[in-house]
Image (cartoon, rainbow, N blue to C red):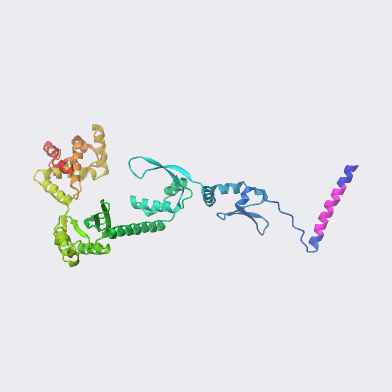
Amino acid sequence: MSESVEMNVSSNIVIQSVNHQDDMQDQGLNPPPTKERKLRSSVWLNMTREKKEDGNYIAICNHCKKKMCANSSNGTTHLKNHLKFCATYQRALRKKLDVGQQLLSVSESINTDGSSKVDIFQFDQERSRQDLARMIILHEYPFAIVDHIGFRTFIRNLQLQFQLHTRNTIQGDCIKIYEKEKSTIYDMLRMNLSRVSLTTDMWTAIGNVGYLCLTCHFIDDSWKLQKKILNFEYVKSPHDADELTRVIKEKVYDWHIDEKIFSIVLDNASTNDAVVDQLLLNTHLKSNLVADGILFHLRCSAHILNLVVHDGLKVKGVSDVVDKIRDSVRYVRKSQGRKENFQKCASQLGAPNKALVLDCPTRWNSTFCMLKTALEFKAVFSRLSGIILTVTNIISLEVHSRKTNKMQTGQVWVISECDNNLPFVE
């Protein structure tokens, strides 16, 4: 009987509550708002919950501002998962953990003796950014390396705190390092009281663009010999005495060493003789030279040695041998098919696993290396000449041999075995 009375009372209360809400809606009044539940999850320390016009809730990440569903039915698991992969949050978290905390690490010594030392390490964004720019300069990496996916993944896994910048920003960093190093060398030359000697060298890029490398040598206050590259300057065509003189004179005045020059080293060429004559016509430069400029011009000994060796290789009989071996090396290297057949023969005969060397006209020691390497493949050349006629898509070495008077004759190999260049190499 009591249970029946309690059920009737509860039903009356519910009916009266519903009727009360209906009366308020009929009168144009809104029912009193229900009290929202308190947010108890720790995820809301990094999220902001907002209500939309349609009554649904969204969560906004305080770090990356990403919006996600935040209704009660959605739970908070997806919000916690977001924080695990939010780079901005993780970076802030790592930075917060590192405040006042230093890591003990073992780093290699600056010396190359293999020793190591214990350093206290704390991440520094600016220093790491400078190290990246110096790495690009030192190893001649492209500025676009910072856009490479593999490199960015490596940096992110190595140090999450490091913020990679664009290629334009890195290029600007490299320019700043150049300007800083230039200023350091300028101050060093300005404060140094000793005289300086200059060396010049011409470089040719792949596109046949000429550059002049101007290097300065001097003894500092600690009696240590210093060598500093002052300029790597583009030289307009033609590379005659007038243009070279203009570039050298301009850079000497830029560095304010016009009153400190002792000597200048140039290649042993007639053009450079004219350069020296034009430089000595400058009364200001000549008046500050030692012994009235008698010791000013020095000829490059390495270039003279190169000329001596090349003249020796031009002796009749020797030049023919060098030309025949050079033509044979060039023949093998000219196509992929020939190189594969040559490597196959080398593998069968147990020859060294190395590539043939083709000499360079400006490097006399490269001719020695070419002859030395060719001698190691003497049996391979002989085997190749015997089987080359049975290989398709390959020009017959016999035709090549007739053009070079049969390079594989014993006389050619005997002459090539002479170590005439060995004393120059040593």
Instruction: Residue at the far top: name it.
Output: 349
Instruction: Residue at the far left: name it.
Output: 316
Q: Is residue 53 above or below residue 162?
A: below
Q: Nearer the viewer, residue 20 or 272?
A: 272
- In this rendering, does residue 208 appear at all? no
Q: How far across and down, in percent of the image, does residue 257 sit?
A: 24, 61
Q: How far across and down, in percent of the image, does residue 417 sit?
A: 14, 38
Question: In the rendered image, which quarter is residue 426 located in?
Answer: top left
Residue at the spot x=24%, y=38% of the render?
342
Question: In the rendered image, which quarter is residue 345 located in?
Answer: top left
Residue at the spot x=16%, y=44% of the render?
424
Q: Nearer the viewer, residue 241 or 343?
A: 241
As drawn, is 25 to the left or to the right of 132?
right
Q: Is residue 127 above or below residue 345?
A: below
- In this rendering, does residue 286 appear at all? yes
As drawn, is 366 to the left or to the right of 24?
left
Residue at the spot x=41%, y=58% of the render?
169
Q: How far across and down, in percent of the image, does residue 285 sit?
A: 19, 64
**Main secondary structure type of the part rendered in magenta:** helix
Per the image, is 15 magenta? yes
Instruction: Residue at the far right: name it.
Output: 1
Residue at the spot x=31%, y=59% of the render?
187
Per the image, is 161 magenta? no
- Which quadrant of the rendered structure holds the N terminus? top right
Q: How far across and down, in percent of the image, does residue 380 sit?
A: 21, 36
Q: How many marks?
A: 0
As drawn, is 118 to the left or to the right of 275?
right
Q: Which residues are magenta?
A: 8-22
